[in-house]
Every structure is written in structure tokens, then in C-alpha cells.
Amino acid sequence: MKENLNEILRQFGFATSAETEHLRTLNNSTWSVDGAYILKQNSDKSQVEKSVIMNNFLRGEGIPVVEYLAADTGDDFIAFEDYFYTVMRKMKGEHVGAFSGDFIDRAYHAGVEIARLHKALKKFSGFAEDYNSDLIHDLKNWVSQEIESKNIDVPREIMDSCLDFAEVYYALPRQLIHRDIQYGNILFDNNRLSGFLDFDLSQKNARIFDVVYFLNAILADNNFNDSDSVKQWRQLADSFLQGYHSENKLCAAEINAFHKMALSIQLIFIAWFASNQTDLIAQNIEMAKWIFSNKDIYEFTVKGI
């Protein structure tokens, strides 16, 4: 693999002596290069093209996203064997734990920056309807099919509750979103958000998909069965939502849809893990049941609504 990495990096202008370090990521497809760059591997050309186009646009809008290095060909990525590779400059900042340090202040300003990201993404029209997502259609089709075909024990009342969400869902504000906004895809510097990563999964969807996904991810990474953790999560969520709303106004319909959106997102995770990481299915079913039974946890009051 080292020889392959050297050949790939050579096409981006690096010397054969460039030092690489394999980074621990979900699909083990990322390397640090000379401590100042990131090499990323992807098997989906369309995802790479989408990410490059979006990052270039967002940089022009003043959003902190990565800068891609051009290959010798002048392109922003290269094809090598069965994969596509990009090289990016490392951004300032680091990953942090959701509840580390002054997490309430950090969450407020993260909300502001994610709101700014959404305002910029709303301007972007480069993909037309190519990535237009329909949550209800997904729930009725591939999500239900995955759960049923693999005999996953998800209570029917949970799925029915999400499908009853259709009328509300179709009335929610829609736009291009990040689609995987969570602490693993955000960098912080001095408690302020300094960078957004990985726009590979971006799509047009209800705007609050990103907002609720962000909050769900924090619950999933911490103990949602522990009352102290949930209390901290509520404090973080309240601050985050106030920050978001101060920059990009939420509407009452969006706030009222949080519980059903959270539950729908959890079903998507269960269906996805059914074909990818089956060891995580049980944990995600447990979380879906917890969300279903704790509607009050998702009831928020945002100033100005």
C-alpha cells in the first residue's frame, strides 16, 4: 500500500519521501500527509465531485471548509485503480467531545455557524434535483424493506408514528443540507467552530434534518439512559438552538417536528446498519424505543418563536 500511496501523492506534487499516517476513520480511508495535509479515498466518483464543488462554493461564501489541492493534471482528484483520491490542506482546529470544557458556550456558537452554513447552502443551485431526498418515501420503501427483510425487531408503532409525520414533513422548509453534521465532522479552535468536513452525503431535505441529526448524534455517542447525560444534552441542545435561531430563524412547525424527525432519523440508522454494521443494530433499536417514549425530551422553547 505504501508504494500506491507514494504514486498517488506524486500525482499531487509530493516527494516520494512524504510521510503518511493512516487515520482511524469509519471506513479507514484517510491518511495524514506530512502532518499538514489529508489524503482521502472514495469509491464513489459522484460523491467526490459533489464534495469538491460544494467546498469550492462554500469557501467563496466565507464558510470554513477544506481547500483541495490540484493534481498535476489540474483536476481536484485522481483515479487510481478502483478508487478516487483527493488531497486537502489540514484545517485549523481539532475534534472535541460534545460535553468537554465549556460545552454550553461552544454549542451556542456551533449553532450560529451551522445556521450560517445553511444560509450559504440555500444559495447553492448547482445540483438541481439530483440529490433531492424524500424522507417519507425512504421510510415507506428501502427503510421498511431492510427492517422487514432482515427480521429486525422494530415495534410497528414506531414506524407508523413516523409515517404519520408525512403531512408535517412536506410542509417543512427544504434546502440543500450537509446530511452528516455531527462532532466527528466539525473542528473547533479555542471553543469556536473552525471547520466543516465531509460534504459527500449532502442532499436537499428538510432543513431541520441537519439540526436534529446533530442532536441525535450526541445522544447516540453518550448514555441516553443516564439522567445526568440527558440533562447535559438538554442544556447543550437549548444553547445550540438559541445560537442557530439567532442567525437563521427557525419556525414553530420545525420546533414541533423535532421528535418525529429524531425518530425517523433513528429508523434510517437501523436500516443502514442492517446492511453495514449489524453489531450496532441493537443499540440503535434501543435508542429508537427511548426516543419514542420520551417525546417531552424533544420539546424546546426557542426565544423569538
Image: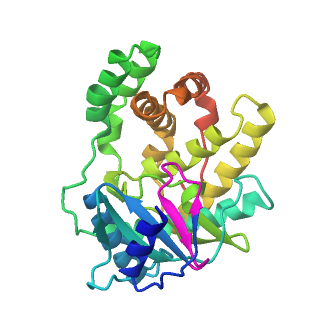
Residue 138 rendering spot, x and y as whole percentages: 29, 34
In the rendered image of this protein, does residue 60 appear above or below residue 292? Answer: below
Judge from the rendering whether residue 302 lies leftward or rightward of residue 40; answer left or right.
Answer: right
Q: Toward which corner of the image does residue 82 lie, by quadrant?
A: bottom left
Q: Residue at x 55, y 27 (%)?
A: 279
Residue drawn where x is 44% and y is 15% of the image = 157
Q: Position of residue 112 (x, y in %)?
A: 57, 67
Residue 164 location, quadrant: top left
User: In terms of image quadrants, where is residue 140?
Assistant: top left
State the residue in front, 144 or 105.
144
Query: On screen, 66 above or below 174?
Result: below
* Colour option used: rainbow
Camera sees residue 137: yes
Residue 303 seen from this side: no
In the image, residue 155 lies in the stretch drawn in magenta: no
Is the stretch drawn in magenta largely helix, strand or loop?
Answer: loop
x and y, in percent, of residue 211 in the image: 50, 51
Say whether residue 82 is left or right of residue 100.
left
Question: Is residue 32 rendered magenta in the image?
Answer: yes
Pick the front one: 204 or 8: 8
The location of residue 110, given as percent across then percent down, is 61, 64
Q: Is residue 260 above or below residue 104?
A: above
* Residue sitting nearer the eye, 141 or 106: 141
Residue range of the region highlighted in magenta in the rendering? 22-36
